[in-house]
Image: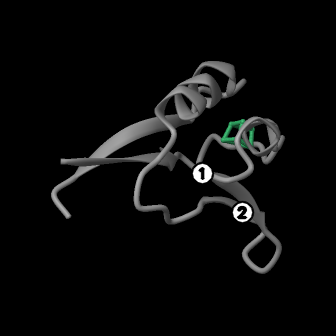
Amino acid sequence: MKRIPVIDLSCCTECQGCVELAPEVFRYNDDTAMMEVIEMPEYPVAKVDEAIRDCPEDCISWEGTSE
Ligand code: SF4
Protein backbone atom coordinates (compact mmCIF):
# COMPACT_ATOMS: atom_id res chain seq x y z
CA MET A 1 0.00 0.00 0.00
CA LYS A 2 1.29 3.43 -0.94
CA ARG A 3 1.26 6.05 1.79
CA ILE A 4 0.71 9.69 0.92
CA PRO A 5 0.88 12.75 3.13
CA VAL A 6 -2.36 14.72 3.35
CA ILE A 7 -3.05 18.18 4.71
CA ASP A 8 -6.26 18.87 6.59
CA LEU A 9 -7.01 22.24 5.03
CA SER A 10 -9.65 23.01 7.63
CA CYS A 11 -6.91 23.60 10.22
CA CYS A 12 -3.99 24.67 7.97
CA THR A 13 -2.99 28.30 8.49
CA GLU A 14 -0.71 28.39 5.39
CA CYS A 15 2.29 29.14 7.61
CA GLN A 16 4.38 27.30 4.99
CA GLY A 17 6.55 25.61 7.62
CA CYS A 18 6.10 22.33 5.78
CA VAL A 19 7.32 23.93 2.55
CA GLU A 20 10.48 25.12 4.27
CA LEU A 21 11.10 21.60 5.57
CA ALA A 22 10.16 19.63 2.47
CA PRO A 23 9.67 21.81 -0.63
CA GLU A 24 9.72 18.71 -2.82
CA VAL A 25 6.58 17.45 -1.06
CA PHE A 26 4.54 20.49 -0.06
CA ARG A 27 3.77 23.70 -1.93
CA TYR A 28 1.54 26.71 -1.80
CA ASN A 29 -0.80 26.87 -4.78
CA ASP A 30 -1.23 30.51 -5.79
CA ASP A 31 -4.30 29.72 -7.89
CA THR A 32 -6.26 28.00 -5.14
CA ALA A 33 -4.60 29.97 -2.31
CA MET A 34 -4.15 26.68 -0.44
CA MET A 35 -1.37 24.35 0.50
CA GLU A 36 -1.08 21.13 -1.46
CA VAL A 37 0.88 17.91 -1.60
CA ILE A 38 2.91 17.40 -4.77
CA GLU A 39 2.27 14.07 -6.48
CA MET A 40 5.33 11.84 -6.17
CA PRO A 41 5.90 8.14 -6.87
CA GLU A 42 7.35 7.82 -3.36
CA TYR A 43 7.51 10.23 -0.47
CA PRO A 44 10.59 10.84 1.70
CA VAL A 45 9.31 9.30 4.94
CA ALA A 46 11.75 11.00 7.35
CA LYS A 47 11.08 14.44 5.90
CA VAL A 48 7.31 14.00 5.91
CA ASP A 49 7.47 12.68 9.48
CA GLU A 50 9.43 15.79 10.45
CA ALA A 51 6.85 18.04 8.77
CA ILE A 52 4.08 16.15 10.62
CA ARG A 53 5.90 16.69 13.93
CA ASP A 54 6.62 20.36 13.24
CA CYS A 55 3.25 21.44 11.84
CA PRO A 56 1.98 23.90 14.45
CA GLU A 57 -1.64 22.96 13.73
CA ASP A 58 -1.12 19.16 13.60
CA CYS A 59 -2.88 19.02 10.26
CA ILE A 60 -0.53 16.78 8.26
CA SER A 61 -0.97 13.02 8.38
CA TRP A 62 -0.24 9.88 6.38
CA GLU A 63 -3.01 8.27 4.44
CA GLY A 64 -2.90 4.87 2.80
CA THR A 65 -4.03 4.25 -0.73
CA SER A 66 -4.30 0.98 -2.61
CA GLU A 67 -3.17 2.59 -5.90
S1 SF4 B 1 3.07 23.43 8.46
FE1 SF4 B 1 0.93 22.81 8.81
S2 SF4 B 1 -0.19 24.72 9.16
FE2 SF4 B 1 1.76 25.26 8.23
S3 SF4 B 1 1.32 25.33 6.02
FE3 SF4 B 1 2.06 23.28 6.46
S4 SF4 B 1 0.23 22.06 6.82
FE4 SF4 B 1 -0.37 24.21 7.00
Which residue carries the number 1 mark? Answer: 9
Q: Is residue 5 left or right of residue 57?
A: left
What's the amino acid at mark 2?
Met
Q: Is mark 1 within 8 Å of ligand 1?
A: no
Instruction: Give the quadrant of residue 29.
Output: bottom right
Q: Decide: is 1 above or below 33.
A: above
Q: Secondary structure at mark 2?
A: strand
Quarter of the rendered image showing ligand 1:
top right
- In this picture, residue 20 sits left or right of residue 9: right
Bin the neighbour count of mark 2 within 10 Å (Cα to Cα): few under 14, some 14-19, many 20 and up: few
- Total marks shown come to 2
Q: Amino acid at mark 1?
A: Leu
Residue appearing at x 20%, y 64% in the figure: 67
Q: Residue 59: percent from the left, percent from the top?
A: 57, 35
Foreground residue among 16 and 3: 3
| Most distant residue in the bottom direction | 31
Please name the residue that numbered disc 2 is placed on: 34
Tell me whether circle 2 and circle 1 mark residues in contact (CB < 8 Å).
Answer: yes
Describe residue 54's horizontal placement relative to residue 47 as left or right: right
Relative image position of residue 48 (x, y in whole percent): 55, 34
| Circle on res. 48 | none
In the rendered image, which quarter is residue 19 located in?
top right
| Residue 61: image location, x then y, percent | 45, 35
Residue pictured at 79% horizontal, 48% vertical: 14
Q: Residue at x 74, y 50 (%)?
A: 23
- The foreground one among 60 and 10 is 60
Q: Earlier in the sequence, mark 2 or mark 1?
A: 1
